[in-house]
Amino acid sequence: MIIDMKNRLTYIVLLIILSISFPSCDDWLSIKPEGDIVEDDFWQSEADVKGMVMSAYRFLSSANTMNRIVIWGEFRSDNISLESSASNDERNIFNVNILPANGLTSWGDFYKVINICNLILEKAPAVRERDLDFSENALNNYLAEALTIRSLCFFYLVRVYGRVPLVLEATISENQNMDCKQSDESVVLEQIIKDLILAEEYAAIQWESNALTKGRVTRNAVRALLADVYLWNMQYDECINACDRILDDKSAMLELVDGKTMFSDVFGQGNSTESIFELNFSINGQRNDATASLYGNPQKNRSPHVKASPGLYNSYKTVDQLDIRGKDFLGSSNRGYRIYKYEAVSSLSDFSEEASFPQGYYRSASSTSNWIFYRLPDIYLIKAEALSEKEGASETDYREALALVNLVYERATLNNDSYLFDNYSSGVAIKKLILEERRREFAFEGKRWFDLLRKVRKEESTIDTWNILALNYEENVELIRAKLSNKNAWYLPVNQNEMSLNPNLVQNPFYQVSGY
């Protein structure tokens, strides 16, 4: 099916297991069947379970998976413009000229991670019977990690494709039938929520170091993902409650980094006090090549494939001349709107309140930057959106939502400015502000396209969201508008290779039309 399950997934599983346990295995590989290797020789101790969990993080951090996380979340949004280095597939994604043959529509790498998680969930419980030192608490922590990582992958897939195969059993043997049908979005979301509720109960509160607490699944990481899923699924009261469980957790010691050091602490150094869950590439022994390749990095001899859009640059200017995010996250027009976030570590000149916007020259990162899934501003703005969208939202809800937005905005202006309620006292105004503030705060973090698609889903209309996107296009505007007037066009097609491998897959209706 999904990635030629009968061959490639079996190969991936064996590769992981052999790399964890056996430095040299040619001799006995020729003696034992592949299925017996997995069943009889591997799942013997807690170390085997932990090694498989770490492999889930490593495959989630792989270049192919990370490329899609960035591209799927940003490349069709109004945050970016193309550079000459962009590939044809990237260019077609940006221009909404997407065909099932486009390699970036392949979902296989996410199903590799899902399969690893399925293996852990199926095999790990029995290991406690073999390893008497393997505690129930440790097992539950590992299972919570597997449930959460699997849920994260399914959440990406369901937002990108709409309907996807809900694969909950591991592929170990090539004799298994993996020709799965797609499940409706509601079914996938229901499974994600069920799994995350269970994971929250059993996840670790913290790990043995700060880097691991930020870089592995914790209870608050589960809550953050659950809040995001509830927001997507328009379950606003549940979303608010999930956010409150994070905000009320004093043991997590979460706090916003000071504005003057936010750029270097959060994105340069990583694992900051506001981080909830991020991929620690240095711990995984990998490099974050996706951001270096897509956003560019002179230190690594990488030319950018994309740059910030003029519209994003102007969004910082029109808010306030002192918004440090405009200075820290991207370059000015005479520097080609270059993206600094992730691929720069610090400014070579101190922030000056008197300086013109934007200001500063940046030192490129020579080390690998982490990828942040959730940090404290996410929780503030997720809760703010849920408050503004919930049924029967009142002035009290709007005031609380604005206070949460101001926590983020005031940090960005070094407490020199704040939004006034008189200007955002209606539901329409506060919702518009939250969407704009999310754009400014999370630029290039793989969230903008999903924010826009969430707006389409809530309104059951593409018109208002298209009017936001239209400003980013200079060519073929009417053709792109015609395509995006169809809500199915906001999702990607099922890749043609997946379709040929699995006869039970059904193509997204938009891409069944001749000419697309």
Image: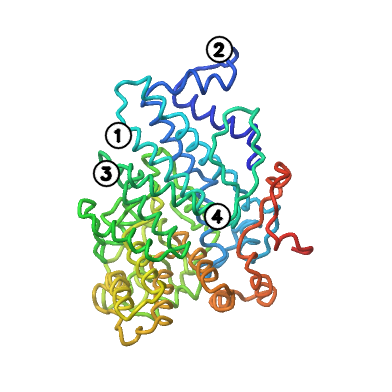
Task: State the residue position of label 3.
Answer: 206
- Distance from Cα at disc 4 to Cα at disc 2: 43 Å
Q: Specify the amino acid type for callout 4.
A: Val
Q: Earlier in the sequence, mark 2 or mark 3?
A: 2
Asked if marks 2 and 1 touch (Cβ < 8 Å), the reply is no
Q: Say which element carries label 3.
A: loop
Q: Say which element carries label 4.
A: helix
Q: In the rendering, at what x and y percent does residue 161 appear?
A: 60, 56
Residue at 48 percent across and 66 percent down: it is 451
Residue 158 has which mark?
4
Asked if marks 2 and 3 touch (Cβ < 8 Å), the reply is no
Q: Specify the amino acid type for callout 2.
A: Asp
- Distance from Cα at disc 2 to Cα at disc 3: 41 Å
Asked if marks 3 and 4 touch (Cβ < 8 Å), the reply is no
Q: Specify the amino acid type for callout 1.
A: Asn
- Distance from Cα at disc 2 to Cα at disc 1: 37 Å
Q: Say which element carries label 2.
A: helix
Of circles 3 and 1, the one toward us is 1
- Distance from Cα at disc 3 to Cα at disc 4: 29 Å
Q: In the rendering, at what x and y percent does residue 31 appear?
A: 59, 12
- Distance from Cα at disc 4 to Cα at disc 1: 31 Å
Residue 137 has which mark?
1
Task: State the residue position of label 2.
Answer: 27
